[in-house]
Image (cartoon, helix red, strand yellow):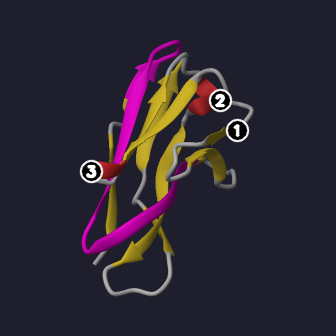
Amino acid sequence: QVQLAESGGGLVQAGGSLRLSCRASGFISSINGMGWHRQAPGKQRELVATITVGSSTNYADSVKGRFTISRDNANNTVYLQMNSLKPEDTAVYYCSAEILGAGAVRFIGYWGQGTQVTVSS
């Protein structure tokens, strides 16, 4: 059973920083792309950042220059460093990963359960 577990969310004042972590666990052969998405109340889930297995990154325009995505392939973990946080960054943040499970023949997309980030003004 493959699972993604996020941690690091919380309440922070505007201008502050948070670091989110997401670790994949279970019987895993390989992990391809990993990423972070977020969903604010009443809004659709949106892409925040992605990172390939070779560490090429992509960011939403709204977070460029403030957020940094990184990964630790040895520990099946992806991180999101969030600086200069704004109230509009308030959302539930979800990690995602394309994972080849042990004995599987194709990659499957998995999602974490989400972690709340609240930025107060």
Magenta span includes 24: yes
Left or right, residue 89 beside residue 7: right
On residue 60, the disc is 1
Q: Residue at x 69, y 55 (%)?
A: 44
Q: Residues within 10 Å of mark 2 (few under 14, many from 20)?
A: some
Give the Cα separation between the discs numbered 3 and 1: 26 Å
Q: Which residue is mark 3?
A: 75
Q: Position of residue 12 (x, y in %)?
A: 42, 21
Query: Which quadrant does the C terminus fall into?
Result: top right
Q: Nearer the viewer, residue 108 or 5?
A: 108
Q: Nearer the viewer, residue 89 or 81?
A: 81
Q: Position of residue 8 (x, y in %)?
A: 33, 37
Give the Cα separation between the discs numbered 3 and 2: 26 Å
Range covered by the magenta-colored residues: 11-37
Left or right, residue 40 beside residue 111: right
Residue 57 drawn above or below residue 5: above
On residue 102, the disc is none
Q: Which residue is mark 2?
A: 63
Left or right, residue 75 beside residue 86: left
SS class, disc 2: loop
Residue 53 drawn above or below residue 110: above
Give amino acid for label 2: Val
